[in-house]
Amino acid sequence: MIMLVMIILHSGAGTPIDLNADAITNMRNPEPGSGNKLFSDTVRCQVNMVDGKYVAVKETCTEVRRLIEGRAQ
């Protein structure tokens, strides 16, 4: 049986995004003290995917990690 573990995150504009937790390779917080130059002010985490794309989300990387860990149980 194949089971997808999906988590719901939110774009910088607040749009819900369903992501396959198994397709996340790593996450990156905005650089401290950089004024969030690479992201809009509402983005708190960059989630990198196995296909090489990334998703910028409102949740912090810590919150995303908790969602992934909570869904895996």
Image (cartoon, helix red, strand yellow):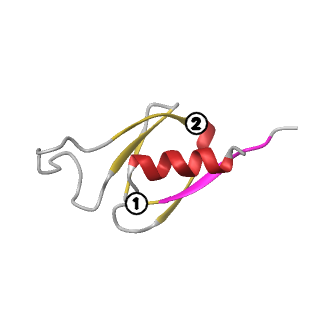
Residue that appears at 78% across and 43% down: 3
Residue 47: x and y in percent read 42, 42
Q: Nearer the viewer, residue 7 or 51?
A: 7
- Distance from Cα at disc 2 to Cα at disc 1: 17 Å
Q: Is residue 47 above or below residue 14?
A: above
Q: Nearer the viewer, residue 57 or 72?
A: 72
Disc number at residue 11? Answer: 1
Which is nearer the N-term, disc 2 or disc 1?
A: 1
Q: Which residues are magenta?
A: 3-9
Residue 54: x and y in percent read 41, 41
Residue that appears at 40% across and 46% down: 61
Asked if the stretch drawn in magenta spans residue 4, the answer is: yes
- Return the residue at label 2: 23
Label 2 neighbourhood size at 10 Å, few (<14), some (14-19), many (20+)?
some
Position of residue 55 in the picture relative to residue 21 (left or right): left
Q: Quadrant of the N terminus?
A: top right
Q: Is residue 50 above or below residue 70?
A: above
Q: Is there CB contact under 8 Å for labels 2 and 1?
A: no
Quarter holding residue 29: top left
Q: Amino acid at mark 1?
A: Ser
Residue 71: x and y in percent read 67, 50
